[in-house]
Amino acid sequence: MTLIKRPGWEIPESRVTPEAAALGRRSLLGAGAGLAAGAVFASRAAHAATQAAGPTATGPKAAGPKAAGLPPMNPPRNMTYRAGRALTAEKAAETYNNYYEFSQDKDLWRAAQKMTISPWEIRIEGLVAKPRTIGIDDLLRQVRLQERVYRHRCVETWAMTVPWTGFPMADLVKLADPLGSAKYVVFTTVEEPKAMSGLDSPLFPFPYVEGVTMAEAMNDLAFISVGLYGKPLPKQNGAPVRITLPWKYGFKSGKAFVKVAFTETQPKTFWAQIAPDEYGFWANVNPAVPHPRWSQATERLIGTNERVPTQIYNGYGPYVASLYAGMKGDMLFR
């Protein structure tokens, strides 16, 4: 008899989200002219679906790399990473999104279709042996794709579960061949003014920039996603390539990046520029450290609306806590 040792982040089945439940990406609220001085995320009601997920004739289409010779977007699932929750419904996850470059409305998927994602190139620069530009097709030919089901914890206290197709961030780092002096990996989201009307807003410091330490990037949980629900990423979900960091609050996972820079200094990330006292560089999930304006002690499971205790590092503590050994302070968790 084969015994399967379940990872420590798996939770009881009594706390699963029904498969028909759904929620899109994090919810943000523009706060007018005062935003630049300290605007923050606003808690909003969850968007739940009562229909089973699935593509429709009028729904968004998956959009991503499809060139000949590329690996399929439905590779085997990595069973090491069991979320312990049913999947968020596909249709709702693809039609209830946050992408301020396009709009502050949730129903932005139509606007996102104006985006051009082919050809797609990623500039690798900074402290690397040889700066270069690589096409997404070439990148995908050099990695082995897998599917991982990750829990997602929004800073607004809702929780969801999504199946990503992609590869470990460590593989991208190795391909980049960084110098020994590199301490951070910085991701910059694309700016397409003709498609992204939100770029005109003076309230946001575009482009969207996020980053991690080299140690975080090399951790096996850090993931580069190119697919969702067994298909290429839809444009509104970050096509063609995005980052996924399941132990951090969702705003750390930037979409549609076109530049990866290796630096010696900590980057000034998007939300940290807007409200540094509320949204810092680290943004690790911690139930004991409240947001300045609300508690993070519990999270609401989408669909049942059941409140359950939030877990340190979103339940992934045994695998990432050592990254922060000796570090203290509330800003480690904001």
Image: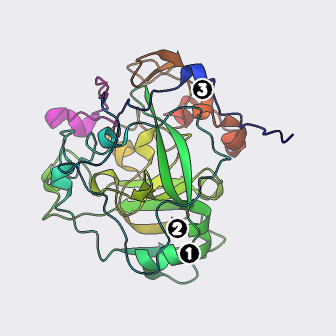
Q: With 92 as the anchor, is 130 left or right in this view?
A: right
Q: Compare marks 1 and 3 and give the one earlier in the sequence.
A: 1
Is residue 140 visible in the rendered structure shown here?
yes
Between disc 1 and disc 3, the foreground one is 3
> What's drawn in magenta, residue-wise?
23-48
Foreground of the two, 320 or 141: 141
Q: Residue at x 33, y 38 (%)?
A: 24
Measured from the top left, where is residue 315 in percent x and y? 62, 32
Measured from the top left, where is residue 262 in percent x and y? 52, 67
Q: How far separated are the C-alphas under marks 1 and 3?
A: 34 Å
Q: Are marks 1 and 3 in contact (CB under 8 Å)?
A: no
Q: Relative to 29, does residue 65 appear above or below in the rendering?
A: below
Circle 3 Cα neighbour tier, 10 Å, few/some/many (<14 / 14–19 / ≥20): many
Magenta stretch holds residue 45: yes
The rendered magenta stretch, by its main secondary structure, is classed as loop
The label on residue 176 is 1
Q: With 167 as the anchor, is 205 left or right in this view?
A: left
Residue that carries the numbered disc 2 in the rendered image: 262
Q: How far separated are the C-alphas under marks 2 and 3?
A: 31 Å
Q: Residue at x 58, y 82 (%)?
A: 129
Q: Amino acid at mark 1?
A: Ala
Circle 2 Cα neighbour tier, 10 Å, few/some/many (<14 / 14–19 / ≥20): many
Residue that carries the numbered disc 3 in the rendered image: 311
Q: With 306 as the anchor, is 142 left or right in this view?
A: right
Mark 2 falls on what kind of element? strand
Mark 1 falls on what kind of element? helix
Q: Relative to 29, does residue 320 appear above or below in the rendering?
A: below
Is residue 183 visible in the rendered structure shown here?
no
